[in-house]
Image (cartoon, grey):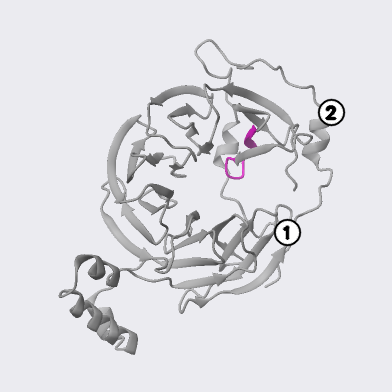
């Protein structure tokens, strides 16, 4: 089903966030970059809108919280009635609005930069509105952060883009360190865990998407598989004790488990791991509207094979668009439908919307047909 809203005639939308498979959609446009509009897209109506002191750079939401990130402040709302619960003022300069919110509303961990000059990560408990920990993740400023589905792991990359690290949450201990490349610095555009937490994919401004496998190597595993690569790995490990610390650290960093070579160059893209028809797939969406679906071998990895390229879908009149066009335009007041305590009168979304399961990628009514 196409997602059409009352703002269909405004082409300047730059933020769209949907609450999983519910009807709640948050929109920010270039015409009004300080205002966030919340829509019920199936009804084609605006639920409310909220204005802030500066331009909105990003929005994150789960079933418990909605987070709005400005360059030097963060606003945390209760998503059911949109009441403002907490404002984090004077946060380090964050011109890209970099932040991540755990999709697990049981913890609702929020991660954002703790420094404008170093790769420090602040982890904040958005449920209990309290600080959790600070992770000194990188020497250079942060470029990307993301949680796994349970909110127990946090991955990060710096502006150099050569090393990706994974930490435990809430402890902040380093679990994994992956080397994306050695030849050049790149700009990481997206990081994403697979739903089962076994893989982490990373895309950048280069033509390569990397997939890393999150597995701990034990001595027993190495002895059980006496391959040439394992033998060479032991030699490097032994030699690393005699080398400078920087070189030694590089030798202990894992490389990509699987890779994808994209045909597009220079287009911004985002990647995600998903299970489609019970098989692991890598999805890559580019800024020109194309969706690329790749096969991933969960055992051997290697070069991924392109299975299908889905071109931009032509606009069509959906049920939501029909309702939107016939609905009465909402009030233009800053806090339309808000009560005196700063929340919406009643719940933003009915309770059954929050109870729905995850998005089903095999649902042909929701997504394009797929042929393996």
Instruction: Give the structural element (helix, strand or loop) at label 2.
Output: helix
Q: Is residue 176 above or below residue 352?
A: below
Residue 318 falls within the magenta-colored stretch: no
**Residue 145's disc number:** none
Task: Provide residue 162's location: percent of width, then percent of height.
Answer: 40, 62
Q: Quadrant of residue 323?
A: top right
Where does the magenta region start and end?
18-29
Task: Provide residue 116's location: percent of width, then percent of height.
Answer: 37, 39
188 vs 139, left or right, is: right
Label 1 CA crowd tier, 10 Å (few <14, some 14–19, many 20+): few
Task: Provide residue 333's location: percent of width, then percent of height.
Answer: 66, 15
57 vs 238, left or right, is: right
Label 2 CA crowd tier, 10 Å (few <14, some 14–19, many 20+): few
Q: Write down the residue under mark 1.
A: 368
Instruction: Give the structural element (helix, strand or loop) at label 1.
Output: loop
Task: Provide residue 75's location: percent of width, then percent of height.
Answer: 46, 27
Residue 107 in sight: no
- Closest to the observer, 306 or 299: 306
Residue at position x 80%, y 26% from top? Answer: 327
Q: Quadrant of residue 22?
A: top right
**Residue 326's disc number:** 2
Residue at position x 43%, y 30% from top? Answer: 72
Residue at position x 34%, y 70% from top? Answer: 254
Residue ranking furthest to the left:
242
24 vs 183, left or right, is: right
Residue 7 in sight: yes
Disc 2 versus disc 1: distance between alpha carbons? Answer: 27 Å
Of labels 2 and 1, earlier in sequence is 2
């Amino acid at each position: 089903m196409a997602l059409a809203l009352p703002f269909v005639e405004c082409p300047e939308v730059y933020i769209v966030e949907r609450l999983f498979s519910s009807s709640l959609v948050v929109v920010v446009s270039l015409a009004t970059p300080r205002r966030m509009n919340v829509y019920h897209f199936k009804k084609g109506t605006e639920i409310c809108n909220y204005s802030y002191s500066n331009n909105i750079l990003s929005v994150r939401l789960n079933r418990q919280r909605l987070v709005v990130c400005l360059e030097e402040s963060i606003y945390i709302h209760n998503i059911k009635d949109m009441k403002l619960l907490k404002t984090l003022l004077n946060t380090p300069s964050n011109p890209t609005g970099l932040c991540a919110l755990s999709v697990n509303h049981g913890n609702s961990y929020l991660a954002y930069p703790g420094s404008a000059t170093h790769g420090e990560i602040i982890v904040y408990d958005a449920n209990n509105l309290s600080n959790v920990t600070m992770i000194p993740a990188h020497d250079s400023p942060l470029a990307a952060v993301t949680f796994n589905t349970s909110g127990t792991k946090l991955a990060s990359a710096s502006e150099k883009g050569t090393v990706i690290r994974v930490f435990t949450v809430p402890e902040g201990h380093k679990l994994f360190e992956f080397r994306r490349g050695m030849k050049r610095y790149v700009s990481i555009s997206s990081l994403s865990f697979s739903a089962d937490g076994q893989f982490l994919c990373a895309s950048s401004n280069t033509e390569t998407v990397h997939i890393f496998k999150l597995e701990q190597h034990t001595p027993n595993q190495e002895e059980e598989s006496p391959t040439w690569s394992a033998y060479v790995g032991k030699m490097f490990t032994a030699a690393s004790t005699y080398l400078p610390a920087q070189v030694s650290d590089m030798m202990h960093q894992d490389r990509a488990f699987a890779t994808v070579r994209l045909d597009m160059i220079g287009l911004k893209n985002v990647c995600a791991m998903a299970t489609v028809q019970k098989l692991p797939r890598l999805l890559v969406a580019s800024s020109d509207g194309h969706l690329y679906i790749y096969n991933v071998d969960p055992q051997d990895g290697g070069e991924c094979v392109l299975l299908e390229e889905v071109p931009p879908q032509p606009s069509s009149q959906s049920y939501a668009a029909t309702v939107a066009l016939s609905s009465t335009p909402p009030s233009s007041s800053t806090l339309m439908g808000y009560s005196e305590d700063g929340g919406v009168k009643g719940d933003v979304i009915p309770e059954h919307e929050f109870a729905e399961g995850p998005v089903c990628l095999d649902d042909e009514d929701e997504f394009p047909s797929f042929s393996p």
